[in-house]
């Protein structure tokens, strides 16, 4: 039995969470759901955006399904990612037939180290200059490289590409590169290659099909995951996962969308795809594929919410997805 903390949060977070639980309930997963409160409304009610109770619930769960927070997002989700020690940020970039994008048939998963690099925030001023310290450890690099290869294996993917700039940042990127090479030797069935991050950005917009699983350090990963999102048509359908040692968080990239909240027209896809990432994480790859295929078909048929050009509401689109399970 897996314990899943369900945190719908604010605005459309609640609406897309409802849809997602409906989709999951069409299967018979051994999941035990427990609800937690967080976000703007919770803060108004209790004075705290992320009550201790919710934090404890998350800590004792195997996974957190998170909808979206509003203005308190930094106090809720950013804090949650830190409290749960999520060492990997996973952002798939996949095209959907029927969604406008620059390319077709792109299917990339970006695995970003999430704890160190320049984002550790070690910065200081010395007279008229400011400096930042880039920390790259062997341990964190091993963990992220191992995660990328095991994900590739689990998801039957063929290639892992490491991105770095070891020709210039010889020590930090050099260490990351060496660790990736070392880990790759243990996965002889998965092709391994490397690019310098700058060249990789060019390839991403000229020939994105050369990427499958991408593994990189924190800041490069932040930048290239947004670039990849642009390549597949924007953030509209973007799910994400924050992988922790014990508990992992699965959440759409979008926020609480106050402009459309309460209207029943939020697109549930990003939240549903975040849940299929959770299924994959737990090894339910076939079930995840089934849901993703049904979602793809629904989008292709134009049975979508207005943001994708359709005229359905959130609940109607969800029903269409569930109908497509059997086709
Ligand atoms: P947003 O992602 O909430 O909305 C941006 C635009 O995309 C809006 O026009 C919205 O209607 C649309 N949109 C987003 N998700 C959609 C969906 N599922 N279906 C249809 N349309 C969708 O970002 P914004 O407007 O910058 O922020 C709104 C609030 O959300 C803010 O309070 C912000 O702090 C919070 N936020 C929370 C995040 C989180 O909890 N992870 C992430 C980003 C923003
Ligand atoms: Mg970013």
Image: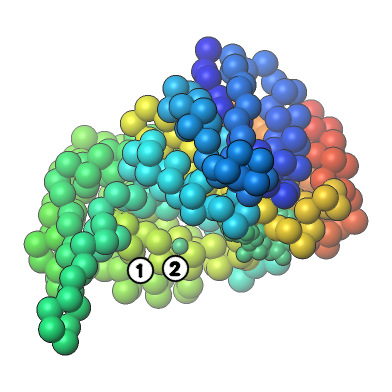
Q: What crowding class fits label 2: few (fewer than 14 Cα within 10 Å), some (14-19), or many (20 or more)?
A: some
Query: In terms of image quadrants, where is residue 24?
Result: top right
* Number of on-image labels: 2
**Is residue 89 depicted above or below 187 in this figure?**
below
Q: Is residue 301 visible?
A: no
Find residue 220 and report its horizontal and vertical position in percent: 33, 64
Relative depth, front residue between 291 and 241? 241
Q: Is residue 196 visible?
A: yes
Find residue 241 and report its horizontal and vertical position in percent: 48, 43
| Residue tagged 1 | 200
Find residue 31 and report its horizontal and vertical position in percent: 59, 18
Residue drawn 74% across the image and 23% down it = 26
Which mark is drawn over residue 55? none
Residue drawn 46% across the image and 27% down it = 56
Is disc 1 placed on a helix, strand or loop? Answer: helix
Q: Are marks 2 and 1 in contact (CB under 8 Å)?
A: yes
Residue drawn 13% across the image and 54% down it = 175
Say if disc 2 is inside 8 Å of ligand 2: no
| Residue tagged 2 | 204
Q: Going by the image, does 42 lie left or right of 16?
A: left
């Amino acid at each position: 039995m897996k314990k899943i903390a369900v945190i719908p949060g604010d605005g459309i977070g609640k609406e897309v969470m409802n849809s997602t639980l409906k989709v999951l309930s069409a299967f018979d997963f051994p999941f035990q759901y427990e609800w937690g409160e967080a976000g703007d409304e919770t803060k108004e009610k209790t004075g705290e955006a992320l009550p201790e109770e919710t934090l404890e619930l998350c800590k004792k769960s195997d996974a957190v399904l998170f909808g979206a927070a509003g203005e308190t997002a930094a106090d809720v989700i950013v804090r949650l990612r830190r409290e749960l020690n999520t060492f990997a940020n996973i952002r798939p970039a996949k095209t959907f037939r029927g969604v406008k994008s620059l390319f077709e048939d792109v299917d990339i998963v970006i695995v970003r180290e999430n704890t160190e690099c320049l984002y550790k925030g070690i910065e200081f001023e010395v007279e008229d200059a400011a400096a930042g310290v880039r920390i790259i450890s062997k341990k964190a690099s091993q963990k992220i490289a191992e995660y990328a290869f095991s994900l590739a294996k689990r998801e039957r993917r063929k290639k892992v590409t490491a991105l770095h700039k070891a020709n210039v940042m010889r020590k930090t990127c050099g260490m990351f590169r060496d660790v990736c090479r070392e880990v790759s030797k243990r996965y002889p069935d998965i092709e391994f290659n490397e690019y310098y991050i700058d060249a990789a950005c060019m390839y991403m917009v000229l020939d994105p099909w050369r990427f499958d699983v991408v593994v990189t350090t924190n800041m490069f990963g932040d930048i290239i995951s947004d670039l990849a999102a642009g390549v597949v048509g924007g953030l509209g359908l973007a799910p994400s996962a924050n992988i922790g040692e014990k508990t992992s968080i699965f959440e759409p990239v979008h926020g609480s969308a106050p402009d459309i909240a309460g209207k029943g027209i939020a697109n549930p896809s990003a939240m549903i795809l975040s849940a299929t990432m959770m299924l994959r994480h737990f090894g339910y790859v076939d079930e995840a594929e089934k849901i993703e295929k049904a979602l793809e078909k629904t989008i292709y048929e134009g049975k979508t919410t207005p943001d994708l050009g359709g005229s359905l509401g959130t609940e109607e689109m969800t029903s269409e997805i569930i109908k497509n399970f059997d086709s």
